[in-house]
Image (cartoon, rainbow, N blue to C red):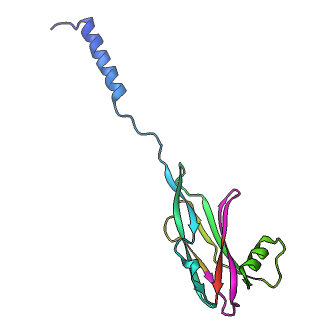
């Protein structure tokens, strides 16, 4: 039996080292999860006339946002509030800009929606309109609270007749 030459030993060691460098390594924990934000009223539900006594649904559009390394989502609370009635759009805008609300103005809160920023299904707010709700124009506040001071607020005008 022949003894291995130093060159053959060196070649074998180099081949082993190169193979070790190219062997698939276990994947690191670089898993990320899609997060979402929520936008209201793209389905036209606020463009319809609402009626006293109705239970209205507001579907929120789910919008992809940044990816996160956290498997558990961050809590999100979506709230809605109707304020009114007002006889004109100008009166509604004036009242919503005024930090001192009119005591005769009625407020109707929708059911708060508690989700997290990984939620993609069932993002729907509910508002029960009282049967004795006066007709007129109402401001609908739409508030999405992402926590830690991160909040998105918008509003739209609802016609109740």
Residue 64 in the image: above or below residue 86: above
- Residue 46 position in % (x across, y down): 59, 78
The part of the image, by quadrant, that contains residue 25 is: top left
Give the vertical position of 119 relative to 68 (above or below): below
How many labels were placed on the picture? 0
Left or right: residue 16 versus residue 106 is left
Q: Quadrant of residue 138?
A: bottom right
The boundaries of the magenta stretch are 127-154
| 15 inside magenta stretch | no
Residue at coordinates 84% horizontally, 74% vertically from top-left? 100
Decide if residue 57 is on the left or right side of residue 109. left
Residue drawn at x 24%, y 10% as measured from the top left: 8
Q: Is residue 33 toward the left or the right of residue 140 in the image? A: left
Q: Is residue 15 above or below residue 106?
A: above
The one of 137 and 115 positioned closer to us in this rendering: 137
Between 156 and 132, the residue placed more toward the observer is 156
Which of 147/17 is in front?
147
Q: Quadrant of residue 54?
A: bottom right
Query: Which of 80 and 15 lies nearest the eye of the viewer?
Result: 80
**Image coords of residue 145 (percent x, y):** 66, 63
The residue under the point 20% across, 6% down is: 3
**Residue depicted at x 69% and y 87%:** 136
| Quadrant (top left, top right, bottom left, bottom right) of the C terminus | bottom right
In the image, residue 48 sits, relative to residue 156, either above or below, namely below
Task: Measuring from the top left, give residue 42's x and y in whole percent.
Answer: 54, 71
Which quarter shows the N terminus?
A: top left
- 128 is within the stretch colored magenta: yes
Tell me which secondary structure the magenta stretch mostly adopts. strand
Task: Give the residue furthest to the left.
Answer: 1
Q: Residue furthest bottom?
A: 132
Q: Residue 39: image x %, image y %?
A: 57, 66
């Amino acid at each position: 039996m022949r003894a291995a030459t130093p060159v053959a030993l060196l070649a074998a060691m180099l081949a082993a080292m190169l193979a070790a460098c190219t062997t698939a390594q276990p994947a690191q924990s670089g898993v990320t999860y899609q997060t979402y934000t929520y936008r209201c009223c793209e389905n036209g539900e606020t463009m319809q006339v609402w009626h006293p006594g109705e239970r209205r649904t507001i579907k929120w559009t789910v919008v992809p946002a940044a990816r996160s390394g956290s498997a558990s989502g961050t809590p999100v609370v979506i709230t809605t509030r109707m304020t009114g009635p007002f006889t004109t759009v100008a009166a509604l805008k004036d009242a919503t800009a005024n930090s001192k609300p009119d005591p005769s103005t009625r407020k109707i809160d929708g059911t708060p929606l508690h989700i997290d920023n990984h939620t993609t299904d069932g993002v729907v707010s509910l508002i029960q309109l009282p049967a004795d709700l006066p007709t007129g124009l109402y401001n609908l506040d739409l508030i999405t609270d992402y926590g830690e001071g991160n909040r998105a607020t918008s509003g739209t005008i609802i016609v109740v007749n």
